[in-house]
Image: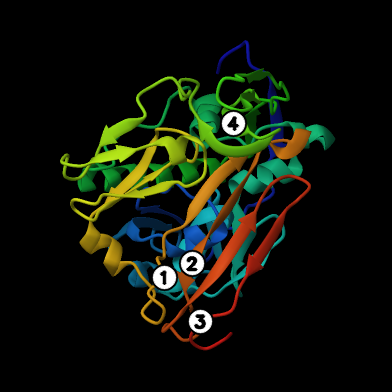
Amino acid sequence: MPKTMTYDNIKNPWKMRDGVVIFDIETEFVLDWSIEAKKELKFRCGVAFSYEDGGYHKFTDPKELVELLKKAKALVTYNGEGFDFFVLEKYGLDVEETAGKKCSPKGIRSFDIMHKIQELRPADSFEKKFPSMDEIIYSHYGIHKTKYDADVPEEVREHCLEDVEFTKRLYEEEMWIVPVKKRAKRRILETDYDNDLYGEVDYGEGTTQIVDFGIPIAVTETDYFFDGPDTIPCPLCGQETLFLYTVLKAREDTLTCSECGGITKFHAGTRSIQFSMTKEENESKVCPNCNKSLISNRYDHHGYGAGPGYISSGSSICKNCGKGCYEWEDDDTPGFRDYWKGKCCFCGK
């Protein structure tokens, strides 16, 4: 392990093997990390290791994976409580939400290594960054996870298997060697008065663009300034010109091409494109009752000095009736954390 790094040594509290299953899943690419968005993510593949038969089981059908998980006495994950369980709920895994925007399977013990590490760290752990799997693997074994191409299904499946293998190794360690990386507090505000009040907050791990006296509009790289072209050709058809004025002013984040009817969604206040969608794709992602778009939005927030967070909003299909949609908003800004869910436009629940 690197000698220049400092570490927390955390004793592994778990010895259980009987009925234990270790698993990981891969999903479609995600830009929005809100709870509602996680619940909507599509499963790509999964791998589970069972101590009962000592074998690794690979899955492309999420319901088959869930059936195996339901038979377990305990499930071992690395951030499963913050991600995997939310995704698998719609495939039949019975879960309950817990504190800290996490969830656990009902009736099955959950051993989440990442969250247990943070829970058992010394009293000043709030100032310490949650360790990524790659960071803790490197601190233990001096190696990094294998790089892979997310567009190649075979590589995605191998990546998932590797994650389960590493999770198993960590679960069997008596002591976890956790690199200490503190959450940066540095704030630097630079303003450009040529385009209204505009600035950028640098909090050490990323930057947040702000306008109008500190109201955040988007997470960006440092080169997203108002100094480029104010128009771009439509990314879908290339025939129509999209005017970016309202996007750069953070008045809207989605533009519709008058030529092909497709939409292009931007990170608010920037030229950075989140995604483009054809007219046909867009029309397929609407509420069957009110025809409202089911696309979600997310932007990071500098946190008014309390640390960065994010605010997400959108509409989702009602899980009660499946015939309408409901609006929701998820505010994860430190000191302002809140979640709101509206009523379904069809059943009213």
Residue denoted by label 2: 315
Q: Residue at left 43%, top 19%?
A: 227
Residue 337 location in percent, x, y? 72, 53
Residue at image location 38% in from the left, 62% down from the top = 53
Determine whether the residue tagged by mark 1 lies in a helix, strand or loop: loop
- The Cα atoms of the two marked residues, 2 and 4, are separated by 25 Å
Q: Which residue is mark 1?
A: 292
Q: Residues within 10 Å of mark 1 (few under 14, many from 20)?
A: some
Q: CA distance from mark 3 to mark 2?
A: 11 Å
Q: CA distance from mark 3 to mark 1?
A: 10 Å
Is 294 left, or right, of 233 in this rendering?
Answer: right
For marks 2 and 4 on the same chain, the one whose residue lies earlier in the sequence: 4
Tell whether 101 sits left or right of 345: right
Q: Residue, x 41% and y 72% (percent of image)? A: 91
Q: Earlier in the sequence, mark 1 or mark 2?
A: 1
Q: Is residue 178 above or below residue 349?
A: above
Residue where numbered disc 3 is placed: 345
Look at the numbered discs 3 and 1 and tell me whether their residues touch, using CB distance below 8 Å.
yes
**In terms of depth relative to the viewer, which is nearer, 25 or 7?**
25
The crowd level at tag 3 (other Cα within 10 Å; few <14, some 14-19, many 20+) is: some
Q: Quadrant of residue 284?
A: bottom left
Amino acid beneath label 1: Lys
Q: Could you tell me if residue 17 is visible in this image?
A: no
How far apart are labels 1 and 2 at the CA level?
A: 8 Å
Q: Secondary structure at mark 2?
A: strand
Query: Which comes sooner in the sequence, label 3 or label 1?
Result: 1
